[in-house]
Image (cartoon, rainbow, N blue to C red):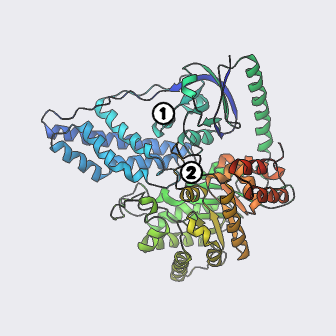
Amino acid sequence: MSTWLQGRGASPGVAVAPAFVVAPRERPDELPDAHDGDARRERRRLDEALEQAERDLRDIAEAMTTAADEGQGAIFEAHAEFVADPELASLAREAIDKGTSAEKAVRDAFDEFSGLLAASADEYLAARAADLDDARDRVVDILTGAGPAPVPTRRCVVVATDLTPSDTARLPTELIAGIACEQGSSVSHAAIIARSIGIPAVVGTSGLLETVAADTLVGVDGSTGEVVADPDEEARRDLDERAADERERRRRLASLKGEEGRTSDGRRVEVAANLNGPDAVDPAVEEGAEGSGLVRTEFLFQDRSEAPDVDLQVEQYQTILRAFPNHRVVVRTMDIGADKPLPFVDRDPEQNPALGVRGLRLGLVMPDLLRDQLRALLRARAGLRDAARLAIMFPMVSVPGELTDARRMLEEVAGEEDADLDGVEVGAMIEVPAAALAARRLAREADFLSVGTNDLLQYLFAADRLLADVAGLPDPLVPEVLGLLDRVVADAHAEGAWIGVCGEAAADPVHAAAFVGLGVDELSMSAASILEIKDLLRRVDAGRLRKAVEAAIAAPDAGRARTCVEEAIPAP
């Protein structure tokens, strides 16, 4: 008999296949406390394990950067940096010299570092405290000689509590029909890999592992968030009909690649792609992206023993700018520091890096780094014809004075380069609550504002959206949040600035519809969601959505607010 479970849709589509259950690795609860007395041999074991883990992780990072477009490569590069960190190795060696085994020394050293990652607010990397455990376990597995975990050998639905970065890296994606996880969110690794390869996924499915055993036939609907275990004949017919509808939907979406984002009543809304570097350009172009609303430039700074030179940066920026002629490309300056420490940035550790010196804050206290990046952007633009329109966006802006200082720095660099700033737009991310409250004053200093929903919501609710106990709190459809965003949009427009949304919420159809109702001018998202949102736009009426959002702001709770918006979205 069919058993239906309800989770949260993380990647659209329908799949039916036998379950491949990713069980937690069997690891000993207790590692040997002490070594046999040969500290030199134990240190050699440690060094060899760290070196092997780093090599493996960099190989995975290179492969994932090519295959995925949502920061997977950056995650593994960060893992490689963890295991290569000289301070971590030093802590472990000190413990070994006192008689501790290499295995326990590694575990203790990593655990000492885990607080930094747990406190971070970065969208893809630092919010995942489990990532540090994943890197740690890789080193311990090498030391203990643990063999590789099994992988699927036939088409399957992957079923797991959640998927770690290492889990996602070893899965043969060509055999994965769908993914279902008991935990996780729309920015978990399971959701990221599902969207990157275009397969259905459901996360947050309570009771999943109690219901589904290995080889159980499983149906997954990534649009509705439903999972059905052991579907009977009626359920199979239902799933087959949904799958047929999904195939037809995808054929219809493909026809929208060359169309611009526009609502049924003619309202223009640009649909752009979030990019993690040049490797993400081709998928975005293929999906019909109208430029980029967020180019994350951290790929240039991570995994380096010294800062990237200007010439290297120019080359990388030009690759992206060439890809989007007649469109806008918004390049976010380095969002690094504190929670994402770099080898060439010498700063003391911070107790709460989520609230520390990162983003523009770091650029202003270490201006040479930021000046070189601005110099490279201006040279990249000057060296191209028929390229994208350059927009420069500063992250982690809290008060208008920071944006004033950054703009002044840009003008100084332009003077040194004899560069024309005409046509170069300057903007700020709205991801700090203080910036949302100061949007009117920020807009006077900016050509545009862009709402980073992930960090903004996380700060507003003081809740890590990847922690199960509080994951439901950060919701953009909470009436008071909608009211705040409504004010931000109005403030931007009152000062002649355009405004976009570049956070994960822009890829969610209901959230995107609400943003259109609020009056945003641009939505930027992962490439895999672009056609979905273009289709949404052509079906909705912006005027009707405006009325729906006004009702949602007056609603008693987020559930009723969601209903207000959903009722204004016509069926496909």
In this picture, is 57 found above or below 523?
above
Quadrant of image for the C terminus: top right
| Element carrying mark 2 | helix
Going from N to C along the chain, the mark reached first, 1 or 2, is: 1
The amino acid on which the numbered mark 2 sits, given as a three-letter code, is Asp
Residue 437 in view of the camera? yes
Residue position for label 2: 279
Determine contact: label 1, label 2, CB under 8 Å: no
Residue 260 in view of the camera? no
Front residue of 155/264: it is 264
The picture quadrant where one finds residue 47 is top left
Q: How many marks?
A: 2
Disc 1 packing (10 Å; few <14; some 14–19; many ≥20): some
Residue 529 - label: none
Horizontal and vertical percent for residue 494? Answer: 73, 75
In this picture, is 312 found above or below 209?
below
